[in-house]
Structures are given as structure tokens and as C-alpha cells.
């Protein structure tokens, strides 16, 4: 039996794919200590892992995450400084055999480096490639990927977040000197690639997939019905599949968008289920149309099985779940990798991507009606979903981790011989 520390961020899309993996590791005899926030304590403990609270004033269940990724990177580095001060002594005392950390949890990677144990990165987003030579060679051969990559808002995000660049560099220097770690880089905050990298997707759903080496394990989606949604279950009225609208759990404080949905679909001959999150006062949205069901939370996996069209922010976990159930999508990206996800879904024929800056009720309604009348979108989504198999990526992830441990064991024996 090995002991593993698992560091994650307080976000549903980053946590839910890892819970089946955690339960499988525990079943195989691993002792897992999982660091997260109170919103996920019950779900984590149900896997058999030990829960530890890493909520901080900087990053917790109530944090409103900035949409600009440069500012997010600086926030993550500030959180890393705080958590290193608090949890590094505890990690030394735990003496783990290895550490698993989310791609947005640099503190987990740094703790592994400082105490000298192997680390594995858990990636629930699109993978950000590194290695300029490989990327350039791929883009020359694949101009469609070049258009995909350079149409993303990377440059504008960098410009808007420029005020955080100097504070980021200063804090990076401080952590480098204090803990003797490699100087943290801006891009590293949203990659944190490690000795092995578990990606909860297939290569079909990853731009520039061929540039990644064999340290990246594309295990496929990890989708299991969740026990903690029972209290939120509800029956969808009527026999026709619904239109389901959700912007996820991070960038969902969007009352103006929800009112736009009211206007767009108030008289459509469909039930519309709208999930607004806990930051939005439903009453403030105005008079709810008769055909709407509005909640702060819905059991997404169950609902997707009764959905004809999903209007989403384009979070990779949500999109993977929709594809698994063969649901076509309208993607309205909010931040992070979502613009790329939207373009990828459009390229694969499973949906349409709409820019939120120019979106109108009329555009949203006409796009929805067109897609509902055109079966090729549902067929493409179902085809991609079928390629996922049983969506039991957590089993392949556990196998990869077991193989990783065996390799490390061989290295240890070689060290003993020397």
C-alpha cells in the first residue's frame, strides 16, 4: 500500500472526474489524503479517502474567479505561497510515496519537488502544449490547428492582465529563493505538467494531440453517476427532451445572459431547464416564463439523458458529459480554454460556438431552432460519445498510476544496488 496526497482546486469540473479515480485507488489499497474545500468533503469521504481542508481567503468555495487568465495565474501563485506555508510541514510529516495535483494546483507540484517525491498531474481541461519546435512543426502540417490556436483570445488576455505581470514576477522570485524551486513561470500556472500527466479525454478531443509525448496518458472521460446529487433530483415534465442551459459553476454570475435566455425561449414549444448557480438571485431575473424550470443546481448527468440541446459555457468536463450522452451543443465561451473547446466542437460537427459579446436573443433562438431541426449535430455528438466507450477513464488512469509506481520501484531497486 502506498500513501498519496491529492491536491485539487474547489471547482466541480476539476473535482468530479477525479472522484471515481480516488475511489478506485482506495479500492486497490492506496491511502489517499485529498486536499480540497468543504463543498466537496462529503463526496471525497464517500470515496474512502481522507479529506483535508485547503480553503483559503484567496481561493475557496465562494471565490469569484476572474475571467482573465493572467490574473488567475497570479491568484494561483498567491494561493501557492499561502498553502506552502501552511501544508509543507504536514506533507513532510505524512511522508507520501507520491503526489497527485490538478493542473491548476501548482502548490501540489511544488510540495512534491520540495520534499522529493514523484508527482502526477491530473488534467481536466484541454492540455496546454509546450515545446515550441514540436508545436511549430505540427502547425505547418496542420493549418486548421493553426487557425484554431491563433483565433483564441490568448494575446488579448495577456494585454488585459498586464498589470499583474510585475507582481507575479516578484512573487515568483520570492518562492524560488525561499523554497529552492524552479522559478515559477506564468504559463506554468495553467499547465503544471509533471512526471506523468493524466488527461480525462481522448486524443480526438485534444488540439495538437500528436505533439504530446508518452508522459501524457489520454485515458478518456471519467463519468460516473454522482451520489451527492440525489437531494437535487427532479422529474422533467412532459415527454419531449428539454433545452438545458448552464454556464457551469465558476463563470456563472451572468444575470444578463439568463434574462436573454428568458427572452429567447419564452414561447418555444419546449421545456427549458436553466441552472444559474448559487451567486444569482433567481427572483432578480424577472418573471419566469411558463416553460422554464430555473434552479441554482441540477443533477447534470441525469438531466443530459433527457436533453435535446445543451447551451453551455464549454467547460471540457461538461462538454465530455454531453458528448457521452449524444447531446448537441451551443457553446457560449466565458474564459479559459472554453473558446478553444467551442471551436473544436464546431469543427467536429457536434455544435455551434457563439461569441457572447455579439449574442442576441434572436441569434440564440435561431441557432437553437436550426440545430434542433438538423439531425446531423446530434448524430455527430453521438458518434463522438460512442468513441468514449464506457467513459471509465478512471480505470485506465488507475492502471497508468500502478504502472508508474512499478517503474519507480525499479528505479528504487537500482539505487539500492548502487
Image: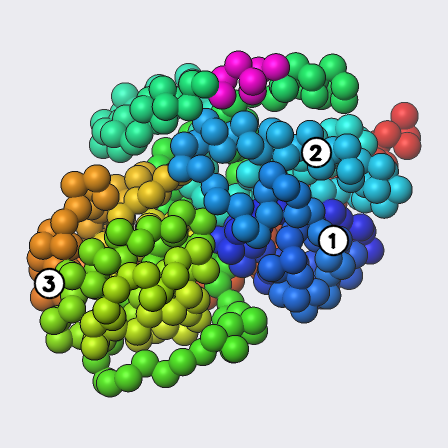
Front residue of 146 and 151:
151
Is residue 391 depicted above or below 71 in this figure? below
- Mark 3 surroundings: few (<14), some (14-19) or many (≥20) residues within 10 A: few
Is residue 245 depicted above or below 201 in this figure? below
Mark 1 vs mark 2, foreground winner is 2
Q: Is residue 58 left or right of residue 165?
A: right
Residue in the picture at 28% in, 84% down:
237
Task: Residue under label 1, please give it.
Answer: 52
Front residue of 337 and 132:
337
What segment is highlighted magenta in the picture?
164-170
Q: Position of residue 158 (x, y in %)?
A: 39, 22
Which SS does the magenta portion mostly show? Answer: helix
Q: CA distance from mark 1 to mark 3?
A: 47 Å
Q: CA distance from mark 3 to mark 2?
A: 49 Å
Q: CA distance from mark 1 to mark 2?
A: 15 Å
Is residue 281 depicted above or below 251 in this figure? below
Judge whether residue 108 is colored magenta: no
Task: Residue under label 2, please give it.
Answer: 82
- Mark 1 surroundings: few (<14), some (14-19) or many (≥20) residues within 10 A: some
- Within the image, what quadrant is residue 19 found in? bottom right
Q: Is residue 216 left or right of residue 339?
A: right
Please tell me which of labels 3 and 2 falls first in the chain: 2
Judge whether residue 167 is colored magenta: yes
Q: Position of residue 301 (x, y in %)?
A: 42, 69
Q: Position of residue 26 (x, y in %)?
A: 72, 62
Amino acid at each position: 500500500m502506498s500513501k498519496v496526497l491529492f491536491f485539487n482546486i474547489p471547482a466541480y469540473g476539476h473535482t468530479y472526474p477525479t472522484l471515481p479515480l480516488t475511489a478506485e485507488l482506495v479500492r486497490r489499497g492506496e491511502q489517499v489524503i485529498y486536499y480540497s474545500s468543504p463543498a466537496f468533503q462529503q463526496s471525497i469521504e464517500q470515496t474512502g479517502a481522507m479529506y483535508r481542508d485547503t480553503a483559503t481567503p484567496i481561493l475557496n468555495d465562494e471565490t469569484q474567479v476572474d475571467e482573465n487568465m493572467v490574473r488567475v495565474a497570479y491568484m494561483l501563485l498567491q494561493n501557492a505561497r499561502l498553502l506552502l506555508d501552511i501544508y509543507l510541514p504536514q506533507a513532510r510529516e505524512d511522508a507520501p510515496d507520491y503526489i497527485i495535483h490538478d493542473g491548476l494546483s501548482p502548490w501540489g507540484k511544488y510540495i512534491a519537488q520540495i520534499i522529493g517525491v514523484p508527482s502526477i498531474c491530473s488534467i481536466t481541461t484541454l492540455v496546454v502544449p509546450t515545446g515550441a519546435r514540436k508545436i511549430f512543426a505540427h502547425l505547418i502540417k496542420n493549418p486548421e490547428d493553426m487557425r484554431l490556436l491563433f483565433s483564441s483570445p490568448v494575446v488579448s488576455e495577456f494585454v488585459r492582465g498586464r498589470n499583474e505581470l510585475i507582481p507575479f514576477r516578484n512573487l515568483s522570485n520570492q518562492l524560488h529563493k525561499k523554497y529552492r524551486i524552479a522559478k515559477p513561470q506564468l504559463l506554468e500556472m495553467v499547465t503544471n505538467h509533471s512526471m506523468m500527466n493524466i488527461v480525462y479525454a481522448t486524443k480526438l478531443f485534444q488540439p495538437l494531440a500528436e505533439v504530446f509525448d508518452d508522459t501524457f496518458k489520454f485515458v478518456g472521460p471519467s463519468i460516473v453517476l454522482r451520489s451527492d446529487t440525489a437531494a437535487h433530483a427532479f422529474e422533467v415534465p412532459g415527454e419531449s427532451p428539454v433545452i438545458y442551459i448552464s454556464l457551469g459553476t465558476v463563470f456563472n454570475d451572468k444575470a444578463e445572459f439568463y434574462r436573454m435566455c428568458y427572452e429567447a425561449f419564452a414561447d418555444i414549444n419546449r421545456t427549458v431547464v436553466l441552472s444559474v448557480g448559487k451567486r444569482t438571485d433567481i427572483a432578480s431575473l424577472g418573471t419566469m416564463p411558463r416553460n422554464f424550470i430555473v434552479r441554482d443546481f441540477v443533477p447534470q448527468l441525469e438531466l443530459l439523458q433527457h436533453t435535446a440541446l445543451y447551451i453551455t459555457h464549454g467547460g471540457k468536463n461538461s462538454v465530455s458529459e454531453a458528448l457521452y450522452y449524444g447531446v448537441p451543443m451551443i457553446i457560449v465561451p466565458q474564459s479559459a480554454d472554453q473558446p478553444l473547446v467551442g471551436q473544436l466542437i464546431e469543427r467536429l460537427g457536434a455544435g455551434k460556438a457563439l461569441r457572447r459579446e455579439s449574442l442576441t436573443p434572436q441569434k440564440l433562438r435561431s441557432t437553437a431552432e436550426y440545430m434542433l431541426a438538423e439531425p446531423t449535430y446530434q448524430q455527430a455528438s453521438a458518434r463522438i460519445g460512442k468513441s468514449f466507450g464506457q467513459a471509465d477513464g478512471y480505470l485506465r488512469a488507475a492502471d497508468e498510476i500502478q504502472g508508474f509506481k512499478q517503474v519507480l520501484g525499479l528505479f528504487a531497486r537500482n539505487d539500492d544496488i548502487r
